[in-house]
Amino acid sequence: MDPVTPLETLCRIVLRAREYDAQVPGEYDADEDADNVDDEDEGSLSVLDDDINDSVEEELRSILEDLGEDQLMEVVAFCWVGAGNYEASDWDEALQDAQEMFEDGGSETLIEELLEMPMLPSVLEAGLAAFDLSCDGIGEMA
């Protein structure tokens, strides 16, 4: 299979999604650690709350926004295959469902689907692997 989206672009999405996943803060219950917080640390921020998270998300979002409609639908379909929602043999169905999602909500709906996807880089890599595609040796992935 030859993807519509260049493999270098798909691998760039994987790389940026890894950075994004690494910086997304988990759930935090302020009451849980209330007794363990020093008064002087009360106003400090963790690195996960820093502006870096915003810039990585903006860069990932920008990469996705720069894709053509057919490329964006393809990335979503690859992720669905990688997540196990579809088999590689059901590629046409996955692509059709991504197209229907696009028709219902446009590019922003597909981008939100990707950004909210648990383990985005892993499922995209697994989707690529289902078609014997790999990021090994491409750009910063090496």
Image: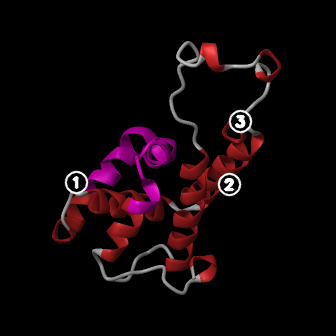
Residues at circles 2 and 3 in contact by the CB criterion of under 8 Å: no
Q: Quadrant of residue 125?
A: bottom left
**Residue wearing tag 2:** 59
Q: Is residue 109 magenta?
A: yes
Cα separation between marks 1 and 2: 27 Å
Q: Overall secondary structure of the magenta stretch? A: helix
Vertical position of residue 128 compared to residue 66: above or below: below
> Closer to the observer: label 2 or label 3?
3
Alpha-carbon distance for marks 1 and 3?
35 Å
User: Going from the N terminus, do you reach mark 1 or mark 3 first?
Assistant: 3
Name the amino acid, label 3: Ser
In the foreground, 96 or 32? 32
Quadrant of the image for the C terminus? bottom right
Question: Which residue is at the far bottom?
Answer: 137
Report the amino acid beneath label 1.
Asn
Q: How packed is label 2: few (under 14 Cα within 10 Å), some, or many (20 or more)? A: some
The amino acid sitting under disc 2 is: Glu
Earlier in the chain: of badge 2 and badge 3, it is 3
Work out whether 98 lies above or below 28: below
Quarter assignment of residue 116: top left
Q: Residue at x 57, y 42 (%)?
A: 24
Residue 78 location in percent, x, y? 35, 64
Q: Which residue is mark 1?
A: 85
Q: Which residues are magenta?
A: 96-122
Secondary structure type for disc 1: loop
Q: Secondary structure at mark 2?
A: helix
Q: Nearer the viewer, residue 20 or 6?
A: 20
Magenta stretch holds residue 27: no
Mark number, residue 46: 3
Residue 61: x and y in percent read 61, 50
Residue 104 occupies quadrant: top left
